[in-house]
Image (cartoon, rainbow, N blue to C red):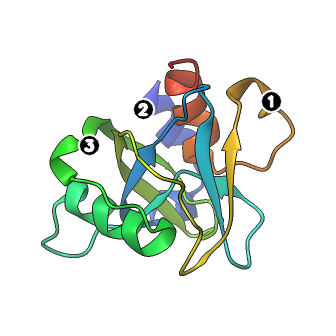
């Protein structure tokens, strides 16, 4: 299926810029997923961000969560779910290469830095919401039902 998809993609999509990120699947006790919306955007997505050159993905995730939500996590406590590719939500000329991690947090996250809004989304209520491709196409179908 991947090869047929790449043959049907426009030439501009094949040459798309790649952004490496680390993103988190975080649930509360009720199974709701933590999603964030960056300033100046309308799309909700997993918390996380870009991996700096030479930085390990779990360390990047811990750094981003601390900067964006005031969450302190031990990178070793993050469970690696896998590597996934998706279209970037806010950069039309880019694709994401995402390292996805599941983790538990203590305390209440507080939006900071470029995060304008944070929500706890019940996966069964996601219909009609503007979600990032990584969240809509990978996280919800694969990990949205776990509790």
Which label number is shown at residue 93? none
At numbered mark 3, what does the secondary structure look like: helix, strand or loop? loop
Q: Earlier in the sequence, mark 3 or mark 2?
A: 2
**Residue occupying the far front of the picture:** 107
Question: Residue 22: image x %, image y %?
Answer: 35, 56
Residue to which mark 1 is pinned:
125
Residue carrying label 2: 3
Measure how far apart labels 3 and 1 are at the Cα level: 26 Å
Q: Name which of mark 1 and mark 2 comes first in the sequence.
A: 2
Give the CA distance from mark 3 to mark 2: 32 Å
Q: Residues within 10 Å of mark 2 (few under 14, many from 20)?
A: few
- Give the SS element for disc 1: helix
In the image, which disc is placed on residue 78?
Answer: 3
Is label 1 or label 2 in front? 1
Q: Pinpoint residue 136: horizontal percent, then vertical percent.
A: 64, 38
Residue 70 location, x and y as percent?
45, 68
Relative depth, front residue between 80 and 18 = 80
Q: Is residue 49 above or below residue 52?
A: above
Q: Is 42 in front, or is 121?
A: 121
> Residue at point 52% right, 35% down?
27
Q: Quadrant of residue 48?
A: bottom left
């Amino acid at each position: 299926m991947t090869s047929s998809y790449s043959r049907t993609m426009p030439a501009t999509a094949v040459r798309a810029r790649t952004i490496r990120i680390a993103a988190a699947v975080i649930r509360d006790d009720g199974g709701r997923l933590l999603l964030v919306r960056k300033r100046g955007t309308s799309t909700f997505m997993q918390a996380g961000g870009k991996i700096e050159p030479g930085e390990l993905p779990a360390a990047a995730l811990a750094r981003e969560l601390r900067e964006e939500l005031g969450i302190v996590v031990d990178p070793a406590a993050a469970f690696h779910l896998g590597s996934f590719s998706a279209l970037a939500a806010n950069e039309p000329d880019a694709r994401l290469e995402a390292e996805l991690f599941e983790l538990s947090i203590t305390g209440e996250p507080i939006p900071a830095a470029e995060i304008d809004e944070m929500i706890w989304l019940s996966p069964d209520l996601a219909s009609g919401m503007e979600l990032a491709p990584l969240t809509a196409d990978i996280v919800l179908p694969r990990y949205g039902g776990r509790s």
